[in-house]
Image: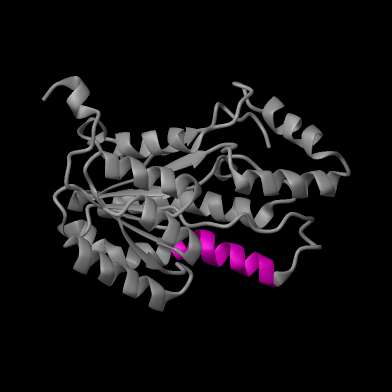
Amino acid sequence: MSLMERMRPRPGLRVLVTAGAGGIGSAIARGFLEAGAKVLVCDVDEAALDAFASAYPDASTVRADVSLDADVASLVDAATERLGGLDVLVNNAGIAGPTGAIDEISVEDIRRTLDVDLFGQFLVLRRAAPLLRASPAGAVINISSVAGRLGYALRTPYAASKWGIVGLTESLAKEMGPDGVRVNAILPGIVRGARIEGVIRERAEAAGVSYEEMEARYLANTSLRRMVEPEDVASMALFLCSPAGANVSGQAISVCGNVETI
């Protein structure tokens, strides 16, 4: 196998991508489809799922809320039935959560953020673990954030969940490594798309400045002074599931243009 061939995932991988109908998840799902994988995508947004299914008829889709164990059980059953097992789990589902001081945000918003962003990953992992152990090439990619390595004022529920994902990743890499399952986290930075636009808008309102000023502040804190594209994150996911990434596990890898502070 040539070095270039080692950089590509082997065709036929069975891949589950949570929240895969839009944004980063969609880019990752598309990348695996292009690599010849069998892909199952879940999402809570039925319209987005329908649009993804129309655009990529080779993919399987199912509606699921990863914060609900019953939904997750049905999702993993679908992976068994439609894919015949599971080689790769991309734990991508997450929400932005509230923006505000710790004593101003609601308990409901805190719980919802942690339920989706962190607890949801636990629920999917505990159901998918037996399938991944049975795979000859089991791999997990947990999507964290640059907020999982830096403090993030006014965004504490989100940051706490993303730091938790890094701890989950490093711990699970040790737990499942003897079974041949690799576990890594990707920490995206300021990824172009609707989610970061909403975050910047809320942060601008909280600071009493314009959207343009807040966006400029975000980019000024990034060494490369530019946003990350969803495809940049997808490329890292594909690498981690290729033969070239066979000995990469337990790592929290930033794809962020070197965000210095947030």
Residue 134 locus on image (x, y percent) = 15, 59
Q: Residue furthest bottom?
A: 70
- The stretch of residues the image draws in magenta is 108-121
Q: Is residue 210 above or below residue 138?
A: above
In this view of the protein, which residue sits in the foreground, 259 or 47?
47
- The answer to whether residue 184 is visible is no
Q: Residue at x 51, y 54 (%)?
A: 164
> Total marks drawn?
0
> Measured from the top left, where is residue 223 in percent x and y?
62, 22
Q: Residue at x 48, y 58 (%)?
A: 48
The reply to whether the magenta stretch includes residue 90 is no
Residue 180 lies, in percent from the top left, at 19, 48
Query: Against 176, is 115 above or below?
Result: below
Which quadrant of the rendered structure holds the C terminus?
A: top right
> Where is residue 19 drawn, in percent x and y?
45, 57
Q: Quadrant of the N terminus?
A: top left
